[in-house]
Image (cartoon, rainbow, N blue to C red):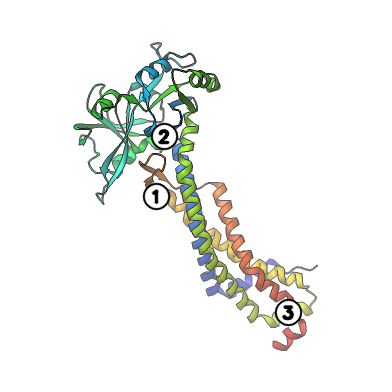
Amino acid sequence: MKALPFSYIARNLRVRRVTTVLTAAGMALVVYVFATVLMMTEGIRATLVATGQPDNMIVLRKGAGAEITSGISREQAAIIETLPGIALDARGQALASKEPVILNNLPKRGSGKPSNVTLRGTGEAGLALRPQVKLVQGRMFRPGSSEVIAGRAVAAGFQGVDLGATLRFGGRDWVVVGLFDAGRSGFDSELWADAEQLMAAFRRQAVSSVIVKLPDPENFEGLRQLIEDDPRLGLEAKREERFYAEQSEALANFIRILGTALAVIFSIGAVVGATITMFGAVASRVGEIGTLRALGFRRSAVLAAFLGESLLLSLLGGVAGVTAALAMQAVDVSTTNFATFAELAFQFRMTPVIAVQSMLFALLMGFVGGFVPAWRAARLRIVDCLRAA
């Protein structure tokens, strides 16, 4: 079977420059929406997964889906610290951090509307367990003081969270003595203070979680079994990476489903546009189709040529849409995490998989929009074409 050359397909798109640009732009817009939705879900997932460390374990009350709904008594936390299988620091003490986690309202910059911010009580051990957290301004809060350090995203997104500023919560004033960068992880959206002072201010008798460091990630199952089988505890343990990955699922799935549904709805318009464009191309080239058939090109070659035009058109739109979506990686956004009801800052994140999925989505629109007109062109009879020419 003789096939029409690619140059013939490309030339026909160049001839119809205006309709080509308009149709490709419509497809590009749909691909842009589709890609940014996937980038958003990937950004949320990457932010929360980066929060956990592979050699850290988090211990929570059984059945608690988040730290804010968990409670561990001081006695239980003390038992955990004595268990074998926990890494030790230079002083021979267990590398464990007993942390209360509390939500507090702060006004957003610009709008002034209140939004939840996560307050985490921690200490030197907590900082040692998170190597991605680096102080970039100021200093660490002093144990036993009403001082806090703020994550990069909190300082950028909330009023009054500046170095040396005073915040009011828990019935007392807290001075911001340091700002930290957590490597674009979830900790960037938190305020950290001394655990004992935070518990006293909010009248808490229990911590929310206990984070421990494993000397070897392979020791996880053994320590997890010890914790979950101990009748005095009634707690469950998870790898920190897995825990934060689970925190991203509800929000990421919601955004992906909603965004994909919108992209599919928008794609209907793009497909209709491609179909109209290709039907117009068929109608204006009836004589040309007859000539091609008379020269010996079969119906399948004509169908492949017109379908190839539609796919090339969608390819152009896909490349433009993905290219536009790449620019979103420079944008910092925040939303409420469904698992914690606290503000979470993240970035859009493009991956090779998302780029491929977006291009396949564009080609699918081109195929659906171009198949019927291409089939129509292939079914035209030579005599009818030449008579109409």
Tell us which disc is closer to us: 1 or 3.
3
- State the residue lying farthest toward the front: 231
> Please, what is the three-letter code of the amino acid marked with disc 3?
Leu
Sooner in the amino-acid sequence: mark 2 or mark 1: 2
Alpha carbons under labels 2 and 1: distance apart: 28 Å
> Please, what is the three-letter code of the amino acid marked with disc 1?
Val
**Mark 3, residue position:** 380
Q: Where is residue 247 in the image (x, y as percent from the top left)?
A: 45, 38
User: Residue 190, can we see it?
Assistant: yes
Alpha carbons under labels 3 and 2: distance apart: 64 Å
Q: Which mark is residue 66?
A: 2
Tell us which disc is closer to us: 2 or 1.
2
Specify the quadrant of the image occupied by residue 16. Answer: bottom right
Camera-side residue: 309 or 80? Answer: 80
Q: Is 370 on the left-hand or right-hand side of 93?
A: right
Sooner in the amino-acid sequence: mark 3 or mark 2: 2
Sooner in the amino-acid sequence: mark 1 or mark 3: 1
**Mark 1, residue position:** 331
> Please, what is the three-letter code of the amino acid marked with disc 2?
Ala
Q: Where is residue 173 in the image (x, y as percent from the top left)?
A: 19, 32
Q: Is 162 on the left-hand or right-hand side of 254?
A: left
- Residue at figure coordinates x 73%, y 88% from the top left: 387
Q: Is 166 on the left-hand or right-hand side of 118?
A: left
